[in-house]
Amino acid sequence: MNPYKLSAMPSLHRRAFLQGAVVCAAATTTAIAPAWAQAYPNKPVRVLVGAGAGGPSDYLARTYGDAATPALGQSFVIDNKAGASGTIAVGLAARAVADGYTLVASGPSAIVVAPHLFAKLDYDAEKDFTPVAMLGAGAFVLAVHPSLPVNNVAELVALAKSKPNGLSYGSGGNGSSGHLCTETFAERVGIEMQHVPYKGDAPAANDLLGGQIQLMFTSPNVAIPHHKAGKMRIIGVTTRERMVALPEVPAVHESIKDFEYLGWIMLFAQTATPQPVIDSLAGVWATARNQLAVKTKLEGMGMAPPAHYASRESLLAMLRIERARTAALVKRLGITPA
């Protein structure tokens, strides 16, 4: 009897054969899943970063990647793909094989804001990606060039009102967190300034150091070293409390009641990545986050992730809220790509 001609079998034998095949297939599938998890990883993991070296995404990816490498057993290779507010890196990650070997570190720009700015993207941020871990979250700092004759937020507002569109500010690009933060601030206090977008916060900070722009809202790790060296002056932070690393700098909230704006960087994998692999990655990055050296470094730069964002479920909930809030903000401000 030809074993591939089921129609030639008696019906009873045929049913028994098919039932046995289903059981074998289920057993095989069950065996494959743990094998997949056990085999991962067998080569370095690439982490795409949508900004140049020195920016907050790059800083956090490298800090965590170095600390997480021993737990993973493979190295994390940081690959900077700057441009288009981070959408180039996220697009590359979306087109990679969903096997856990290509991740992307991104802030809100490419994951939350871009879908409301660009008619066409080569990825669907909400459907294509799932968060693995929160790498950093915290205040922005308001930094000004030392030549600007202001020492606090109130003086900056007064100067800007005396010179409508006379001050220029930099950001990591149209729709970036720094851009939205500055425009939210400007709208709140009733001032107008010229926006100069860059490909990341690091080049914007370079032009602030050189005096080509007068101010910017940026992440603490970008500005604090220059502030301490006297090359730029931080006059405000966007959390409601003062930062441990800058106890002498007032919160913007102290001058503008209830003003608060937080930035964050997350590590994302493709949604289609096998769940055991995502769980493995989340575990090793959580291990890195809990290392004293990492915690101390991030706390010193004001980028320590809040404890209530430790779980992936909390990150998914936060993203839902952020997407709704950002959609309303972009529409209200009429922000468009450069």
Image: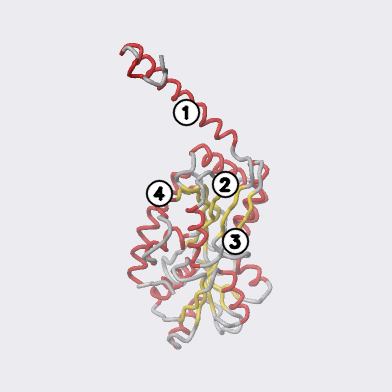
**Separation (CA) of disc 4 from disc 3:** 28 Å
Residue at 66% over, 68% down? 225
In front of the other: 265 or 85: 85
Q: Which mark is residue 101?
A: 2
In front of the other: 334 or 148: 334
Residue at 39% over, 50% down? 127
Indicate which label's residue lies in the foreground, 1 or 4: 1
Most extreme residue toward the left is 11
From the viewer's perspective, tell me whether residue 76 is left or right of residue 323: right
Going from N to C along the chain, the mark reached first, 1 or 4, is 1
Going from N to C along the chain, the mark reached first, 2 or 1, is 1
In front of the other: 194 or 84: 84
Can the viewer see residue 260 in this picture? yes
Going from N to C along the chain, the mark reached first, 2 or 4, is 2
Q: Do callouts 2 and 3 mark residues in contact (Cβ within 8 Å)?
A: no
Circle 4: residue type: Ala
Q: Which residue is mark 1?
A: 29
Circle 3: residue type: Asn
On the image, the x and y values in percent for residue 76 come to 63, 50
Indicate which label's residue lies in the foreground, 4 or 3: 3
Q: Which residue is mark 3?
A: 80
Indicate which label's residue lies in the foreground, 2 or 4: 2
**Separation (CA) of disc 2 from disc 3:** 16 Å
Q: Secondary structure at mark 1?
A: helix
**Separation (CA) of disc 1 from disc 3:** 37 Å
Going from N to C along the chain, the mark reached first, 1 or 3, is 1
Q: Which mark is residue 317?
A: 4
